[in-house]
Structure formats: C-alpha cells, structure tokens
Amino acid sequence: MYRFLLTPRWWGINVFVLLAIPFCVFMGSWQLSRFEDRIQDHRTASEQAAAAKTAAARPLAELLPVDKRTSGRQATATGRYDSGRQLLVPDRELDDRRGFYVLTMLRTDGGKALPVVRGWLPGTADAAKAPAPPTGEVTVTGALQASESPGSNGVSTVGGLPAGQTGAISSAALVNLVPYDVYNAWITLTKTDSGMKAVPATAAQGTGLDLKAFQNLGYTGEWFVFAGFVVFMWFRLLRREAEFARDAELGIFPPETDATGEAEARVEAEAEAKS
C-alpha cells in the first residue's frame, strides 16, 4: 500500500520535510535565544542603573567610549560653558508632559566639547525661557549617555528646526551647529538650577523590553508553528495517497490513475457503480 513512498515525487516531498523541520526548529530556537538575551540585557541594565545611583562619579575620560556597561554611570567633567551656543531639544517628554531640554556645550581642557543637558522645561521650546549657564570654570556631574541616533525623536534633519534647536543629541547632529569637536556622548545633570527639572538617564539602546524584544518572541512561535504545519501536511498527504492506493487495490478506480486525477477518478468510479 505504501509503495508510492518510493516514487520520485515522494522522494522530493520527504527530502523537503526532512530539511524544513530542522530549519524551522533552529530558527525558532534562535529567535527564542534572542528574546532571552534581551531579557538578560534588560536585567543587567536595571541592575547597573540601580548601582550607578550609589556609585561614585568618575572622570569622563575613564568611562569613554559609552557602552552598555558605562551608560548611565555618573561622570564628572571640568570646563567652561559656551553660553553663546546654548541649544534647545524640543518635543521631549518628562512625567507625561511635553517640553524641551536645555542643552549647553561644556568646553573642556581636552579641546572637545561635552554636550550637557542642564535640565528640562515644560511647553514649547523657547530660548527666552532657558536660563543662562553659569560663568567661569565649572565641574559638572551627571549620568553619561550614548549619542542618540539622528531622527530618534521624529526629526530627521537639523534643517527642519528653527535656529538654536537640534532634534538629536549626537556629534553627527551638532557638528553643523558648533565650530569645534564634540564628544560622541553627553551627560544629563543630576542637580539642576533655575527651576529646571533633572532629566533621568535612559537605558542603553538594545537593553530594554521594547517592541523588537516581543517580536522575537512572536517569531519564535511562528517558526514552531511552521514546523508543526509541515508535519501536519506530510501526514495529510500520506493519508490521502494511502487512501488512493487502497481504493486502487479494491478496484474503485483504475490503479494507473495518480493523485493528480483524484476528482476525475472518483467521478468516473461513481458513474460506473451507478451503471
């Protein structure tokens, strides 16, 4: 009854099934491992954020470049604020309210400038609302952050904003706004002045339980469903072919009729039985 399994068509079906099932299982397992990695990164980032709040601040140079380990750590830097090039970062939310960051460049002794978010103010970005930075040499302390990706706040180009504003805090976005080199990092002050609110540090990119993390979990289920579907279809085809073979042995329809002529063969068999 199962001699049809030796036909070339079934050899092809069997090879496809033997390759498809391990592939689907492998891809599902890989997506699951990606989700577990994101869970672990999220836990590590949470633990590091909690530890950073109590850890002593360290010089900026010791924490660069910014990575998952140093993101959120307290850093210190000494220099002078460039009060003539204070910038605003619009459309930033804090405590479910829309407002803007006050961003001032700190000219350090190393020659580069460090972007410093001195605080957050509610409402529409307005340079008149932003308090002037302190004068003279200052030492700032705040949470270290990696440069943002251009367009991360919905603004793709600096040219689409009014003068004195930037859509992303990054060296790539600031290079056209200031005439000196900028660190590929920034800090948000722990303590602010002039009525501004301190901006909390954000988790490093790729460490949060965002939509991508749950997409990995969804893809895991999809790949295992695909593997089950392949097995289901193989058994279904096997059962149908076995029924054809049995019907052929019983003479219900001619044995030379193959599976592709199922409908025609059954109609002819029923017509002959009635006659």
Image (cartoon, helix red, strand yellow):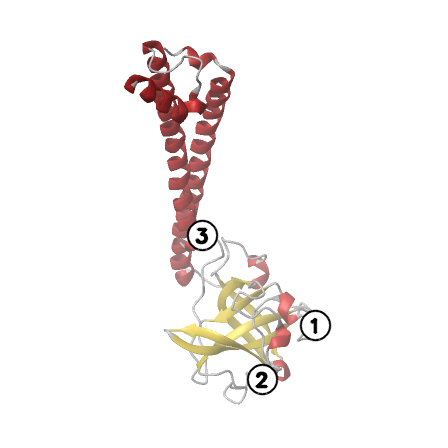
Image location of residue 44, percent across then percent down: 41, 50
Please say if the residues under marks 2 and 3 sit with CB atoms less than 8 Å apart.
Answer: no
The CA distance from mark 1 to mark 3 is 36 Å
Q: Nearer the viewer, residue 78 or 85?
A: 85
Residue type at mark 3 is Lys
Q: Residue at x 49, y 17 (%)?
A: 11
In the picture as drawn, the residue positioned furthest to the left comes out as: 274
* Residue marked by disc 1: 180
Residue type at mark 1 is Tyr
Q: Which numbered tag is attached to residue 19?
A: none
Q: Residue at x 56, y 70 (%)?
A: 155
Depth check, mark 1 against mark 3: the one in front is 3
* Residue marked by disc 3: 212
The CA distance from mark 1 to mark 2 is 19 Å
Q: Which numbered tag is attached to residue 135?
A: 2
Residue type at mark 2 is Thr
Q: Nearer the viewer, residue 186 or 141?
A: 186
